[in-house]
Image: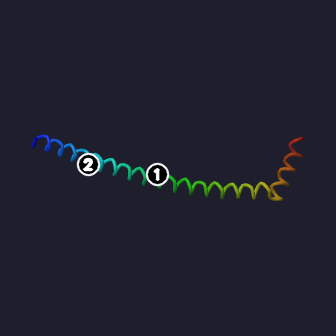
């Protein structure tokens, strides 16, 4: 019976080590996920910025004028 208790204790120790290892891996994954979310957020902000810049240029008077000239001269 003492051997069974020792075996069970050894098994419990292995399970605890495995749990600790998996918990550390989980924490690393969460950390990586948070970093990726932060990068995605930065990319979204940059995308919105450049879309606004593009729309500002595309809707500007000078660009509209250039497009008209291009359309007129393209016919020749």
Query: N-terminal of the two: label 2 or label 1?
Result: 2
Whether residue 50 sits left or right of residue 33 in the image: it is right
Q: From the viewer's perspective, is residue 59 above or below residue 11? A: below
Q: Nearer the viewer, residue 64 or 74?
A: 64
| Quadrant in which residue 50 is drawn | bottom right
Q: Nearer the viewer, residue 24 or 45?
A: 24
**Percent x, y for residue 18?**
28, 45
Provide the secondary structure element on which disc 2 rests: helix
* Residue marked by disc 1: 33
**Percent x, y for residue 73?**
88, 45
Whether residue 70 sits left or right of residue 13 in the image: it is right
Q: Residue at x 14, y 40 (%)?
A: 4
Q: Nearer the viewer, residue 40 or 68?
A: 40
Q: Residue at x 82, y 58 (%)?
A: 62
- The tag on residue 16 is 2
**Percent x, y for residue 9?**
17, 46
- Image quadrant for the C terminus? top right
């Amino acid at each position: 019976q003492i051997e069974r208790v020792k075996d069970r204790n050894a098994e419990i120790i292995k399970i605890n080590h495995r749990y600790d290892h998996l918990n550390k891996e989980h924490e690393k994954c969460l950390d990586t996920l948070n970093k990726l979310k932060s990068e995605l957020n930065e990319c979204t902000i940059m995308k919105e910025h450049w879309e606004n810049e593009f729309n500002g240029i595309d809707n500007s008077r000078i660009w509209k004028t250039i497009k008209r000239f291009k359309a007129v001269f393209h016919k020749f």
